[in-house]
Amino acid sequence: MIRMKWTKRLTGLFLSVAVFTLFWLGTSLQAANAAEAVQPNLQLAVKSAILVEASTGKILYSNNPDIALPPASMTKMMTEYLVLEALKQKKITWDEKVPVSEYAFYIAKMSDSAGVYLNLGEEFTVQELYKAMAIASANDATVLLAEKVGGSEANFVAMMNKKAQELGMKTAFFATASGLPANELGPYSPKGIDKDNVMSARDAAILARALITDFPEALEYSKIPRLTFREGTENPLKKANYNWMLPGLPNEYAGVDGLKTGYTDQAKYCFTGTAIRDGIRLISVVMGTESETKRFVETQKLLDYGFSNFKLTKVQEKDSAIKGFETAPVKKGVELSVPAVAENDIQLVSKIGEEKNYQPTVTFNDLTAPIKKGQVIGQVVYQAKGITDEYLRPEDAQKSGYNLVAAQDVEEASWIRLLFRSIFEFISNMLGGK
């Protein structure tokens, strides 16, 4: 009798476990299906990838975006950033001549290193070297610029890692300015470093976005399809841009104007690209593809998806009021409120057809007169129910809102006006309470 009771209890327990397991599996499958519905399967043959809208940092697609991988010559985007920053700070000038160093000459002699074959005794302007780096991915020109800006490559690499932290790059680490593996630099291999260059696809996109946002002139160089180095001399060197998606090159793609390729045995073939169409700029990153052409084929899949499925829509004109949020309350002012308008045009990145799902949420600051025309008095964020937008960095999400400003001045009320206003409000409240 006791045995039968235990048998029944065990049977009930097994049935409960089975029901729970089936429920859990069903829920998991539903979640997986929902995730697949949100993000399409682009069948990318990559180790990692990401697609971003440039003006907002909004992520449109990602595949293993946070895996730290060797970036090869995509490292040069950071070198470009620091060179352009030094130019902006007037630490160097475009026409400043730089003599070829022993280190740059050593790199130039490496048989498997991209370069412009710098020779001892030669000197070139910063601009000539920058072009060689940005267009021909010249490692010799890159290390020469690093030495010029940092005093030595070691100092420059320290600057690179500091800037990576400032930009919010979480996985990036730099050991060389060129992207060449540290252990391949012979007598110039960095001392005391046991790691090599690594960077995630997300970090590459953060860096690319910072580069073209802070220094848009970078695109004026990255979009050049072909370079003639030592132009006007007896020995000009002609090289095509390694970015074959530029006009006139094998994988030409309309709108592409950057940014940086990369290859080493460890990294395989990588590419950080950017393109603009119909007013929307996209940044794409693919890492770990298997051939020189494949990195552009996979990039095209990303860009095709982005341009076919997303749009940039102007939802509010500059100096116009948000419907339903036309005024903000003001304390101690001659007027009790101030007209609120958009500080700038407000543009929304959304999937085509979903832009109407986004509605404004307005938050006004706690305002006390006096208020000046043009003063920031609040913020508007556009959100869609059931849609969670993802951004490159937390600060990009925080900046996804737009400022609202006062459309006119509001003067501070006199004490007499405030006194009578208080008396009136007191009487109104008394009467309203009866």
Image: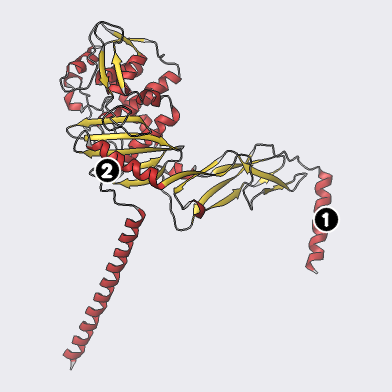
Mark 2 surroundings within 10 Å by alpha-carbon count, few (fewer than 14), some (14 through 19), many (20 or more): many
Cα separation, mark 1 vs mark 2, equals: 66 Å
In the image, residue 137 lies at what x, y percent? 27, 23
In the rendered view, does 414 fall on the left or right side of 338?
A: right
At 39% across and 27% down in the image, what residue appears?
219
Q: Quadrant of the N terminus?
A: bottom left
> Circle 2 — which element?
strand
Residue type marked 1: Phe
In the rendered view, does 108 fall on the left or right side of 391?
A: left
Decide if residue 151 is in sight here. Answer: no
In the image, residue 226 lies at what x, y percent? 30, 21
Instruction: Please name the colour scheme applied to the rendered image.
Output: secondary structure
Residue under numbered circle 1: 424
User: Relative to 418, is 239 above or below?
Assistant: above
Mark 1 surroundings within 10 Å by alpha-carbon count, few (fewer than 14), some (14 through 19), many (20 or more): few
Which dot marks residue 48? Answer: 2
> Circle 1 — which element?
helix
At 36% across and 15% down in the image, what residue appears?
127
- Depth check, mark 1 against mark 2: the one in front is 2
In the figure, residue 187 lies in which quadrant?
top left
Q: Quadrant of the C terminus?
A: bottom right
Residue type marked 2: Ser
At 49% across and 51% down in the image, what residue appears?
355
Label 1 vs 2, first from the N-terminus: 2
In the figure, residue 21 lies in which quadrant?
bottom left
Give the residue at the far front of this rendering.
Answer: 248
Decide if residue 310 is in sight here. Answer: yes
In the image, residue 6 lies at what x, y percent? 20, 86
In the rendered view, does 404 fall on the left or right side of 419?
A: left
